[in-house]
Image: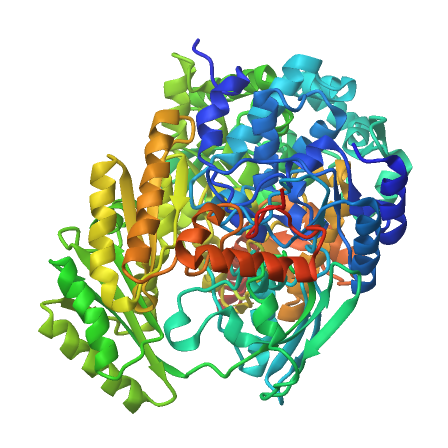
Amino acid sequence: MKTTPYDKLEEVQDALAKCMKCGNCMAVCPVYLTEKEEGAYARGKLSIAEAILKGDLDLKDDDVQEKLFNCLVCTSCMQNCPCGVDVCKIMLSLRAALARETGLHPIKKVIFGALKNQPFFDKAMKAGAALQWMGLRKLPGNAGYEPRFTMGLSIKRIFPGLAATPFRDQAPELIKAKNRKTKVSFFTGCAFNYIFPDVAQDVVEVLKENDVEIAIPKEQQCCGIAVFAHGDIESARVLARKNIDVMEKTGADYIVTACGSCGESWQHGFKELLSEDPLYGPKAEYWKSRTYDISTFLTKVIDYKKPTGRVEATVTYHDPCHLKKVMKVFTEPRIILNAIPGVTLKEMAKPDACCGSGGSYTITHLETSMAITGRKMDDIRKTGADGVITGCPGCMMQLSEGLANSGQDHVATHYISLLAKSYREARKSKTEEIKHAA
Amino acid sequence: MLDTAIIKQLEDIVGSGNVLTKKADLVTYSYDATADMPSQLPDVVVMPATTAAVQKIVLLAKEKSLAIYPRGAGTNLSGGTIPLKKGIVLSFQKMDKILEVDPENLTATVQAGVVIQALSDAVAPYGLIYPPDPGTVTTATMGGSVAECAGGLRGLKYGVTKHYIMGMEVVLASGEIFRFGGKTVKNVTAYDFASLFVGSEGTLGIITEIIAKLIHPPKFRKAMLASFKRLEDAGNTVTGIIKAYVIPATLEIMDKMTIQTVENYAKVGLPTDAEAVLLIEVDGGAQQLVDSEAEAVLKVIKENNGEVKIAQSDTERDQLWAARRAALPALAQLSPTTVLEDATVPRNRITEMLVAVQKIAAKYQLKIGTFGHAGDGNLHPTILADARNKEEMERVHQAVDEIFAAALKLGGTLSGEHGIGMAKMKYLKSELGESGLNLMRRVKEALDPDYMLNPAKMVPVKG
């Protein structure tokens, strides 16, 4: 297999040379807007990358590592870049080089190893013990990481916890449709499987309502985005290949996701990882064009059943970074919300500003992360909406925590849950009508 | 590495979290947005939040003979913030409070680190605007843009930064704090200090606070795009519009190379067979006024064989503007290194300047796209190259030399809005002569005898 920048750092040279240091990325970087230092945002990080390649800085240097990981990989900078610099590729290539040179941090090694071993990971998650890995806390200076244990859980006090029964244990592997329109494979992702099985049920309910046959293969793996983001390229590749095999076996026409990061993996990440893989490269390319966020699938691929059940709610919508900035999905969830009778959508200022989650970023960089979330909470409050809707479980967790911390007494909801609710209301009133008529 | 005692003193002034000394941090303050410039690590980066802190830092630097480089967002295009002689980078990014918006006197008072867009957002609820709008409004700071006298797309009708600065607070090289100006429209007390410090590029004093003038924006506007088969026709249209007693809010030009690149990049429907297009916007306080100005403009376009597209809605206006805004990004995508110049000529020499740039591009076999503020005579010849290619960069340098020579020959100036910094210092003599250089040096030495403030910019360091 030919090498990629993820295998050999020198190959980012061309991507790096495109940056003209204009600093436009400064205006939108959530980390910069919090920390106000040049090293916080893309221009500074790219100059550090240049210095590493020139030999002026050492990748293994603690201060350099700190810069490389102080990034949410939200891709906001890339949207504002006049030169089209692939900041993501450069950052992840640096992290991959670091992992190659110094090895993964021991705790990360255990976690990523577990992710690759789905049955083991599944068992661990069910045992609930695995929640503790989410409580990693970076010690001041460079002492490394420590589990946060009680403290982490008390800060993340509204962290929803693990579901008693993961979604894929509740759901059948195939749900047939009577007037089958098409067949999709539902790539659930870890968060829906282990934390929000009810939202996954809503996805299924909406697809059923639209006569879509649904495969939910139990063997599907973690999408691997966190593994990729931390530079463990080989593990990320193993997960990508396994996922492609599993989804291919279902014979589905499309893959449907309801998580920006999972969708991002299928639409972008797998292709990046496997670009030089003669067997899986073309497969990744094929599924890239056949993976849709559920909102796109409903509004653009099939002509979805318009919601008629009334749901009284004034809501505001937060655009998840990977959903909007990588998958380019931002009108579709709004189309759905606006179609629901009773729902009023009030836009907040900067709905696509990052919520501060960044996956593990919120654990390793708690202070900056929560400051970013704080700005989001101000924007939410100003809308006067009584509900926050989004399209990614990572954002749901972060926003819910922010809402609790800022004394706003509601939690963030996935847009699909509102649509499912509207369908339910419609069915309910239909049943009542029938009863009434009888 | 600086003496640890000095670092400790700096930490005592601003707090340890606001002093950066690690190499990974210093690297990120070693450059600015200027292409093809040397970079240099500073000894330390200090981020003050108050004028009192700035004063203490200046006094310490004076005592220890350290250079100070005041720095906003580092988006300038003249190498103006590169810490060439090492020393202290004084970053204003954390000194970013809007102190007051005064809608009765039409002023705003801000700390130097306030981003221009943040000021615009703060005054918008009062129905006011701060007109200077350089391409970097969302990132550049008020302090930086005042120090560089930034321009922008509205210069022709609304002027540039220097027309909107009513007063300032400056920390001098002596360590004294000096306030001048205020909220009055008229003020002839003493020298016109605003003129001294606006555009001084951090070499005469450190701007810590600014009183800016605000205006009520005109309510009505009309935008149009005119395309021309001959450069001369575009040039004559620019002067013809002014002669017809119309001062458009915007009068922008793009040459053929730019048009084709933008169209290829953004597919906005530009005529790729045109030699030049003009983006023209007229505005005013009444619809009738705007309509009659637009009519006058249309007549001039027609007389000069132009084809015109008028924006019928805000959406169509945004589309026209999107084409102009895509100019730099589109050109920048073509090659790794983008050398953006801003040679400026009297507006009736625009055609000659455009032709001169095209000839220079051909002579040195370089790709140069030119766009810019035609109404201001302010062009941005944008040279596309690759800094890794030494031979090509040599040709770029020669082309730049010739572009400046051409501008001066046409009665123009080296820089319309980017400033001199270190990028254009060597050309100063050709515009100002020996007497001008001597005066520059005397002004510099009167205010900063030790060359402590932003040394090696604008005025060469002694000896």
Asked if residue A225 can be seen in this view, the reply is no
Relative side of B309 to B112, left or right: left
Write down the quadrant of residue B112 in the picture.
Answer: bottom right
Comparing A261 with A414, the one in front is A261
Name the residue at 58% across, 61% down: B200
Comparing A187 with B371, the one in front is B371
Q: Is residue A184 above or below residue B316?
A: above
Write down the quadrant of residue B295 in the picture.
Answer: bottom left
Indicate the position of residue B35 as horizontal and vertical percent values. 46, 40
Looking at the rendered image, the quarter that the N terminus of chain A falls into is top left
Q: Is residue A156 above or below residue B219?
A: above
Asked if residue B358 can be seen in this view, the reply is yes
Indicate the position of residue A101 as horizontal and vertical percent values. 66, 13
Comparing B76 with B345, the one in front is B345
Relative side of A31 to B299, left or right: right
Q: Is residue A136 above or below residue A327?
A: above
Indicate the position of residue A195 as horizontal and vertical percent values. 70, 38
Indicate the position of residue A256 as horizontal and vertical percent values. 47, 37
Name the residue at 38% across, 31% down: B386
Relative side of B324 to A327, left or right: left
Relative side of A86 to B323, left or right: right
Write down the quadrant of residue A290 in the picture.
Answer: top left
